[in-house]
Amino acid sequence: MVKDDLQPIEAEPRKGNSLKFVIGGIVIVAAIIYLMVSSLQANVQYFLTVDEVLEKQNSGELTGRNIRLSGAVLGESIQYDMDTLELRFTIVHVPADIKLVEDEGGLAAALHNAVMDPTRSQLEVVYYGAKPDLLQNEAQAILTGELIANGVFEADELLLKCPTKYEGSVPDQIES
Amino acid sequence: MVAEIGFGSLFISLVVSIYGVIAALYGTSNHQKKWILSAQQAMRLVFPLLTITVGSLIYLLINNNFEVVYVSKVSSLSMPLYLKITALWGGQSGSLLFWSWLLAGFTSAVTIKKWDRDQDLLPWVIVVGLGTLTFFLVLNTFFENPFVRYWQVNQDIVQSFSQPAGGFIIGPRNGSGLNPLLRHPGMVIHPPMQYLGFVAFIVPYAYAMASLITGRSDDRWIQLSRRWTLWAWLFLSLGLILGARWAYDVLGWGGYWGWDPVEISALMPWLSGTAFLHAVLIQEKRGMFKQWPIVLIILTYNLVIFGTFLTRSGLLSSVHSFARSAIGPIFLVFIALTFIASFWLLSSRWDKFKSRQELTSFFSKEALILISIVLLMGMLATTFWGVIFPNISELITGAKVTVGPPFYERVAAPILGGILTIMVICPLAVWSYVSFKHLGKLLWKPFIVSLFGIVLPILGGLTKVPAVIAFWLVAFVLAVNGFELVRRTRLRRKTESESFLEAVFRVFQRNKRSYAAMIIHVGIVFMALGIIGIEFFQTETQGTLAEGQELQLASYTMEYEELQIFDTPDARNVARAVVLVKKDGEVLDEIYPRRDFYYDSGQPVTIPGVRSTLVDDFYVILVDWKAVTSEGATFKVYHNPLVKWLWIGAWVIIFGVVVATWPEKKYSMAVSKNARPK
């Protein structure tokens, strides 16, 4: 007799043995939930604005914490040392509240206002690595890293967005 | 004129699809077949109508009609023809239109089949298909119209589709051009694949809903949608892989996957879709857990819409997201409505879909598949939680938080390990019942072979325990599959006098689906190998070199030869470094890491030079150079072991799905025996 693997070998289901499958299922689900919760606690990053970082830095609650930070890049501050790959620039406070950004006329306008306003709070950023293509004046920088000294942030991840490059309002060169 | 044709056709298709939904509902509630047939005609009509719309937009793109706002934003004079055409999906409104067009194509194709046996399902498939299409057409017609133009009214420039009072059309001389990052072959085909995958999953969902509404609890809806599901899964997989490949080739950070929220939003329907495919198998073979496929396809459908929503709502900051838009809330309402309606339907039919069978053994095939479904869903829950947790946390505590790649990696690694473990046992398990003893008999030989997967890496100097376990599991899965193939071939040869190779082929042919699954799983394991390689063993270095200087990484040496700077006809300025890759003093290859500067958009793109082998990739990025003096250039260098297997695995999976969906040859056993050559 050739036994085909795909042929079900029927066995009478015994009553009451479904309990072990329920327990097995619960164990697996519990393991996944434990994995999720413990990983989450270990890896939550605080998303802060420049204002919030400057406000909280003296209390010491930010030391050693992984922070995600966003702000507008100040173009004239960008310094790059090709030999050490040390990149330094300054970011300017941009409100995190979407409503405030909309009130200023969208992200592009909010970034522009931030860079033009000398009264806004600023933070110095250090990053070691390749200089990203999109790092330019009025770009939105989203940084991940730690505060290494008062007013200095060391980023180990650098994400940049130039809103004007994607969908601007009206192109510059218009002709009738 | 062309814009008017395009928009007119778009509007008509919206009307037709609304009509189709109403006609189908009316026809089925009054048992009037002519209304259902009329709805079927409507469903066939939307595809040609939308083809006219898409054709019009492509015409405008090709002819540089920059007075159309969309054209001026995604196209420019210097772009080559194929990029002008593919700019169709390069921006928000165009890509939504493209989405609708594909959906119309699929729903039209569904209506072409003969519906004799399934007349009762037809009206509901139409309602779901055209209902979804209507939603997207409403977005395209009223909120994201790709045919909006620039008008000058007095001194102001107004964006509008129809002519404002006293306005006349004006347009810029040149467009701002497609985002240079998107000008890559991978990027040209990645969105269509992704969309095809998304859209094709709507078909099985439509069948599932039709089945629920009519109360047909048999397997018919699954049989009807099986090919759609497989192709949907393949396209979605390809979309993900092409996206990864694009990131690896263009984004220039040495990786392929960044747990970016938009990547995750494409991964989520893939996870639930994969779970769906497996749940379907249990229902077909054992008639068990019939509610599971329905739950999973509802989830997949909603995650498809959710993914489309995430990329278009401006909710997320990511490389993928389009500009902020007003369509976010409408999406959420649509998702909420379909989600609640689907689950309400399911709960009202819950008892009908109950099965009498019960699980009997942990090592039966259905139990193992069930566990892998739970693991996939665990991964899905994790990714979903990671994406929405920041929003929830902000609501409750007011603190803005995010979760980064480490969170996902920590959860994903054990889950991937669990899935690989199941892939070891599953090919040997049988449906219904199997004892551990029986499994052990089949497992011990592959187990011994798989020990090579431990010994070889350790001899190679590997010390990381998780990596050793991962390699061992990969070797084990491959060994199990190899032994199974040989064992079944032997079994066949006991009764048939065939050569070994012919027997292998016949075994495949007789049980195409199960072997196609085997091929696909081997592809998955290859991909796992690539992921393990780059995740555990990637190393990097950087340095500034003068011409002729060298830099070392892993067992390789790179030598910087020279820098070439030149303009290209398509308005790029290319700075290209010539780099020699050497090993033990011998030159292996010449690679060209480069930086392209696009004049029209004023944006540079960094493209790495890669020497790729089965063992490892040597990946060099040109970071910067001293322009005038040409005294040196800065490089960032990555050594990525085994990453090529990620792409090889993808090809294997494609092959597997083609085998699985290849049209069945109908022949009886007798014929096949007679036809067998002597």
Image (cartoon, coloured by chain):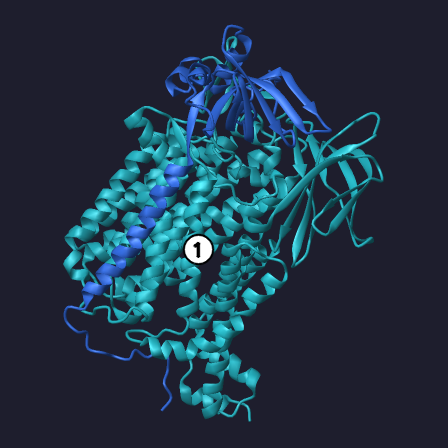
Quarter of the image with the C terminus of chain A in it: top right
Query: Percent x, y for residue A111?
Result: 51, 16
Give the colour of chain A.
blue
Query: Percent x, y for residue B333?
Result: 28, 34
| Nearer-the-camera pick, B51 or B669 | B669
Query: Percent x, y for residue B676?
Result: 51, 89
- Can you say whether B532 is above or below B174 in the image? below
Residue B666 seen by the camera = no
Q: How many marks do you count on the picture?
A: 1
Task: Indicate the secondary structure of the residue bearing disc 1.
Answer: helix
Q: To which quarter of the image does residue B176 belong?
A: top right
- Can you say whether A28 is above or below B543 in the image? below
Q: To which quarter of the image does residue B77 belong?
A: top right
| Nearer-the-camera pick, B539 or A63 | A63
* Chain with colour cyan in the figure: B
- Can you say whether B87 is above or below B610 in the image? above
Left or right of B630: which side holds B24? left
Q: Give the residue drawn at x 31%, y 47%.
A: A33
Q: Around disc 1, counting alpha carbons within 10 Å, would you say few (fewer than 14), some (14 to 19), or many (20 or more)?
A: some
Q: Which residue is mark 1?
A: B416
